[in-house]
Image (tube, rainbow, N blue to C red):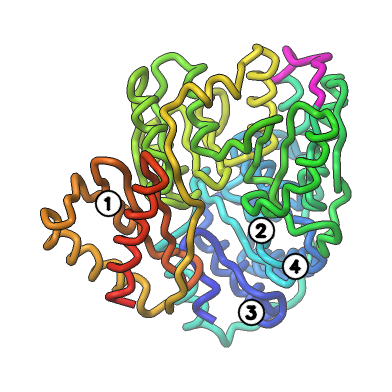
Amino acid sequence: MKYIFREYDIRGIFEKDLNEKVVKLIGFYLAKRIEGEYVLVSYDARTHSPTLKNWLVSGLNKAGKKVINAGMLPTGVNYFGNFVPLCLNGVGKINIGGSIQITGSHNPPEYNGFKITIDKKPFFGKDIYELGDEIIKNFDLDIEDNFEAIEYDLKSDYINYIANQFSHLKDLGLNAVFDCGNGVAGVVLRDILEKLNIKNYEILFEEPDGTFPNHHPDPTIEENLKWVKDEIKNGKDYAFAYDGDADRIAFLDKKYNYKGDILLYFFAKNMKNPCVISEVKASQIVYDEIDKFGKTIMYKTGHSNLKTLLYEKNCDMAAEVSGHIFFNDRYFGVDDAIYVTFRIMELIDKGFDFISEYEKLPHVYNTDEIKIKTTEDKKFEIIEKIKKYLNENKEKLKIKKIIDIDGVRVVFDDGWGLVRASNTTPVLVTRFEASSPDVLERIEKTMKEIINKFL
């Protein structure tokens, strides 16, 4: 059972891993770590999410918490609930001690899991592992069914908040397509667009359906963007696509699909003296160019890692290549793809020329993530061996710099290569970038030969 307790969340297959006993215990022992009286629970569109909600609520109730059920919502809305007072009937305004979003994110339909916030901060890493250990030690505890919860319309609070924050976009003509992928983006998106009287748009696969009948909702996979690309070919200017729980976004125009690190650059260009954070997989160009007018910090991959550092450094925003984007500027520092949608629409409204700004950047060639299979037991050990080898052969390999905050990012004069252990799956993740296709091929070949020595 221990493997379901992962670096950033709890995740497994419904009933096989996440069965009634396990989920009730997760609710009970998680509640012990939440100081506040109230805990917010919401869930994604997966067919088994309501069942998991009932089991989780039983555990939370057993521990004496008052559970607020916000229903089916995007993960960003769940995060939002931690930062605004909730007005409960007969009680008045309250602040919650933490929240749990039941979601399998971009995993296949049989998966589900929990993304957890306590005291406005992500609950991850060592804390999740310790929770798993405690549950395993106390597995004999029986928890009875108790589905009692306070029903709360957080959805309306969020829709009104976003519409108020972006009231200056009222009546905007957009000429765009949105692909909800039958995830939960469709729960709130149209309502906000209608409140703002946004004109000229189309929404694809809006109805939440946890079987994902049209395509799998992972916008980092190009084949999942086929439908929005077709709409652009047919005359739309812009496209937005979301993952299953709507905490990641893809944004495309007539020419390019802009990854999260490039979007970070666009947003930073529209800020005064920006301080921004990205990850080891991000393009060096983004760091170099933003450093000309602001400040950048390179950090570990992982939405919880970036959120935590964003709070600590009080920077303006952070972004992952995969489309997790976090605004601390005018928002709460959480990855909320619906909120990001309207920040992009602000740039459109201002007449920001995405294509021209992108093409002004120094041209580099890079790969997508390339994954190399290994085992959970070996993956971190392999990284340590690679790190040792690279440091011992730095001169011979003409390495300019080794960055080891998350795996190893090896910087050469004309490019870089990254190898890191995934925190969620038994793979090594690699990515390469260079000044020309030939150099890219050379760096990739060199790095893969080194990796193969230790597999």
- Label 4 or label 3, whichever lies nearer to me, is 4
Q: Quadrant of residue 104?
A: bottom right
Q: Secondary structure at mark 2?
A: loop
Q: CA distance from mark 2 to mark 3?
A: 18 Å
Query: Dot 3 surroundings within 10 Å: few (below 14), some, or many (20 or more)?
Result: some
Residue 293 in view? yes
The residues bearing labels 4 and 2 have C-alpha atoms spaced at a distance of: 9 Å
Image side of residue 442 versus residue 111, left or right: left
Between 142 and 332, which is closer to the camera in this rendering? 332
* Label 2: few (<14), some (14–19) or many (≥20) C-alpha neighbours in 10 Å: many
Callout 4, which amino acid?
Pro
- Disc 4 + disc 1, Cβ < 8 Å: no
Mark with earlier residue (3, 1): 3
* Mark 3, residue position: 17
SS label for mark 1 = strand
Position in image of residue 154 (x %, y %): 76, 40
Q: Nearer the viewer, residue 108 or 335?
A: 108
Callout 2 amino acid:
His
* Gap between marks 3 and 1 measured at Cα: 38 Å
Is residue 278 highlighted in magenta? no
> Eyeballing the image, is 313 above or below 106?
above
**Residue sitting at 25 percent across and 46 percent down?**
412
Magenta extent? 165-175
Reading the chain from its start, which is encountered first: label 4 or label 3?
3
Q: Based on the displayed image, in which of its 4 quarters is residue 334 positioned?
A: top right
